[in-house]
Amino acid sequence: MSTLTSSIGRREMLNFDFTFVLTIINILFLYWILKKLLFKPVTQLMENRANTIKEMFESAQSNKEQSEVMRAELKEQLDKAVEEAEKIVNESRVKAEKQYEEILNKAKEDSKSLIEKAQRDIEIERKSMVNELKAQIAGIALAAASKVIAKNMDNEINKKLVDDFIDEVGAA
């Protein structure tokens, strides 16, 4: 019986070994199928997702840098615009002050010219009135003198005498 038990035991060992080998082959085959059908696509999907996230992060970083550059450029343009506006306002103020001075000087010159013209007109009118008064006084004096003297003298000579008298009185 010992031969029989030993042959049965060997068979069982062979069966056990053969099942073990088939199990290992099945596991390796299953691993290979899973690797081809599942692991590889999942790994590739994970890598693609990681690359997409990395690209999005880099794009966001690039956009942030571009926006910072644009913000700096816009701030610089705004500063230039403010500076230009201040320059224009100052130039306008200087120009307005210059025009104000020109208008004021022209008004002063015009008023001075008007005053001088008025003084000339007044002087002309005064001389005209003085001459008219002289003529009236001479006429009155001649009329009074002719009544006083009662003698008729040459009117030209009388007029000259009265004019000389008025000039002497007017000079004093």
Image (cartoon, grey):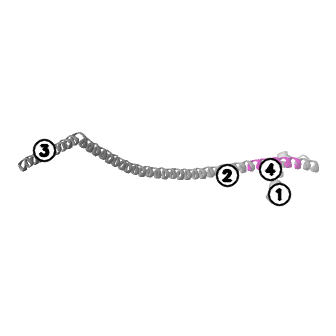
Magenta region includes residue 136: yes
Q: Foreground residue, 143 or 15?
A: 15
Q: Secondary structure at mark 3?
A: helix
* Dot 3 and dot 4 residues touching (CB under 8 Å): no
Mark 4 or mark 1: name the one nearer the start of the chain.
Answer: 4
How far separated are the C-alphas under marks 2 and 3?
139 Å
* Residue 15 image label: 3
Q: Position of residue 33 (x, y in %)?
A: 20, 40
Mark 1 or mark 2: name the one nearer the start of the chain.
Answer: 2
Please state which of the two labelled residues, at mark 3 or mark 4, is closer to the viewer: 3
Left or right, residue 113 beside residue 98: right
Which residue is the site of mark 4? 130
Give amino acid for label 1. Val
Q: Position of residue 121 (x, y in %)?
A: 73, 47
Please state which of the two labelled residues, at mark 1 or mark 3, is closer to the viewer: 3
Give the extent of the magenta segment.
123-141
Mark 2 or mark 4: name the one nearer the start of the chain.
Answer: 2
User: Looking at the image, is 40 positioned above or below residue 172?
Assistant: above
Please state which of the two labelled residues, at mark 4 or mark 1, is closer to the viewer: 4
How far separated are the C-alphas under marks 2 and 4?
26 Å
Which residue is the site of mark 1? 169
How far separated are the C-alphas under marks 4 and 1?
13 Å
Query: Going 93% across and 48% down the picture, which residue do you hit?
Result: 147
Please state which of the two labelled residues, at mark 1 or mark 2, is closer to the viewer: 2
Give amino acid for label 4. Val
How far separated are the C-alphas under marks 3 and 4?
165 Å
Mark 3 or mark 4: name the one nearer the start of the chain.
Answer: 3
Please state which of the two labelled residues, at mark 2 or mark 3, is closer to the viewer: 3
Q: Position of residue 169 (x, y in %)?
A: 82, 57
